[in-house]
Image (tube, rainbow, N blue to C red):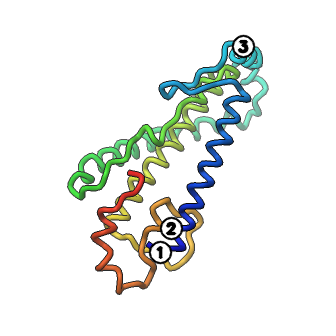
Amino acid sequence: MNPRIEELMHRIQELQAELEADLEEKRARFRYRIEDRRVRFEQEMRAMQQRLRRGSLRYLLEAPVLYILTAPVIYGALLPLLLLDLAVTGYQWICFPVYRIPRVRRRDFFAFDRGLLPYLNWIERMHCVYCSYANGLLAYSREIVARTEQFWCPIKHARHLAQAHERYPLFLDYGDGEHYLAELERLRRHFPGA
């Protein structure tokens, strides 16, 4: 791999470690811990947060009418999301073993902890669960597609992408036909973080 890209990826890892340290600070500030992938608030903090909860009826009455009218449009996307979930999950379970691509673990991309916050009413919790599912599914799908792209076409694009996936820096430079055949098989077997 290109030494400059390796250096940048190392810096990204350092920044991710800084981010994790910041998250640990927040856990201490808001007095919760994670045990067996579950969030546990200290009892006093949980009680204080429950007192902050706004009732569901009040929430609906204070909501702008357009928010309520557009809710069916937002939740109407659930069926396509479920179909996408079924398609990408089935795809990786059928095809990845054939290509010897490591499968993507769902649990690495889905987190439903916001729906458990004591200061949210049931409507806000439902919104959080929906958004967590949709964003988790899109990230999960992106990783499945990124691994597929790495196997079949690990070539960077000629133009800059707004947000390339994490595997993209490993790809070969656009126009580098000299290294394409030599590197293709190595890239098909190199799945860091998988």
Q: Mark 2 points at which residue?
A: 6
Drawn side of residue 127 relative to residue 5, left or right: right
Q: Nearer the viewer, residue 134 or 41?
A: 41
Dots 3, 1 in contact, CB < 8 A:
no
Drawn side of residue 30 relative to residue 88, left or right: right
Q: Nearer the viewer, residue 189 or 117?
A: 189
Q: Which structural element holds mark 3?
A: helix
Name the residue: 38% across, 42% down: 105
Dots 1, 2 in contact, CB < 8 A:
yes
Estimate how packed mark 3 is, as few (under 14), some (14 to 19) or many (20 or more) residues with alpha carbons within 10 Å: few
Name the residue: 32% across, 75% down: 183
Estimate how packed mark 1 is, as few (under 14), some (14 to 19) or many (20 or more) residues with alpha carbons within 10 Å: few
Estimate how packed mark 2 is, as few (under 14), some (14 to 19) or many (20 or more) residues with alpha carbons within 10 Å: few
Q: Relative to 13, is 31 above or below? A: above
Q: Nearer the viewer, residue 27 or 157?
A: 27
Residue at mark 3 to residue at mark 1: CA–CA distance: 52 Å
x then y, percent, for residue 194: 38, 51
Residue at mark 1 to residue at mark 2: CA–CA distance: 6 Å
Q: Mark 3 points at which residue?
A: 44
- Which image quarter: residue 81? top left
Q: Earlier in the sequence, mark 3 or mark 1?
A: 1
- Which image quarter: residue 188? bottom left
| Residue 44 seen by the camera | yes
x then y, percent, for residue 185: 27, 70
Q: Which structural element holds mark 2?
A: helix
Q: Name the residue under label 1.
A: 2
| Residue 57 seen by the camera | no
- Residue type pointed to by label 2: Glu
Name the residue: 48% across, 68% down: 169
